[in-house]
Amino acid sequence: MTEEKIEEVRETSDEAIPDHPVSKHRGHRRRMAKRFAEAGFDGWREHEILERLLYEVLPRRNTNEVAHALIRCFGSLRGVLLAEPEELAEVRGIGPVSAKWLAALLPRFTENLLGTMRQSPVTDGEMLVLADWFLGYLAYPAAYVFLASDGRLLGAVPVENAEEEPEPEGQVILLIREADASHDLIRALAGHLRPRPDKVFALTKKRELRETEI
């Protein structure tokens, strides 16, 4: 992140983030909590997801404005989650503690997500969650899902990190976005995939998984 970009966010954030929540935000957190309880993050915009996450470490601040500042600075939710703590702390409203918390969120959430799927066979719904996470929120072009012979999850990684995984002992699933299924990059990638996938599923715009070929 350049010094010019940091300064730009600082300047706009100084005016945008009040020391105390203003009246128009009264009850906002309760409405967000109710919305999350009813449908999870389905249909949420990136800054809204980040705003909700920041509740955990910024209980008294207007996290809506902090979330907007972070998105402006890093370009996307993925950019925020992949940023270093020192970079995050440059944004007004984010201190050292919240910066470290945000930086640790991605690996912690991923590990928790995968951990729950290692106990029993992965369901269609859980496979969709994996596709949403890797292809949607993290914006990777493709991801591997490794399943044991009984359907339990062994691991899930972006394709670019697959060399870090041990040789699979069960089924190998490749997840891609439907819009990329015929893309030259994906076709070129398919010819060099190691390990070779047993099945390929594409994530559609309607958040459905469809088996496909590349």
Image (cartoon, rainbow, N blue to C red):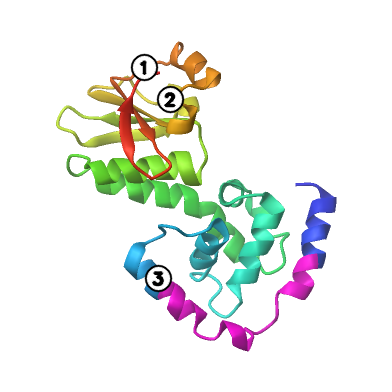
Residue 40 pos. (x, y %): 37, 61
**CA separation in Å, label 1 and label 2:** 8 Å
Residue 189 pos. (x, y %): 49, 17
Where does label 3 land, which residue? 35
> Looking at the picture, does residue 38 appear above or below residue 155?
below
- The label number, if any, that marks residue 195 in the structure image: 1
Dot 3: what SS? helix
The residue positioned 73% from the left and 59% from the top of the image is 90
Outermost residue on the front side: it is 206
The residue positioned 61% from the left and 88% from the top of the image is 23
Q: Nearer the viewer, mark 3 or mark 1?
A: 3
- The label number, if any, that marks residue 162 in the structure image: 2
Q: Amino acid at mark 1?
A: Pro
**CA separation in Å, label 3 and label 2:** 36 Å
Q: Amino acid at mark 3?
A: Arg
Q: Is residue 45 left or right of residue 40?
A: right
| Mark sitting earlier along the chain (3/2) | 3
The residue positioned 40% from the left and 47% from the top of the image is 110
Q: Quadrant of residue 69?
A: bottom right
> Looking at the picture, does residue 162 appear above or below residue 121?
above
Residue 82 pos. (x, y %): 58, 46
- Residue interval drawn in magenta: 12-33
Outermost residue on the bottom side: it is 23
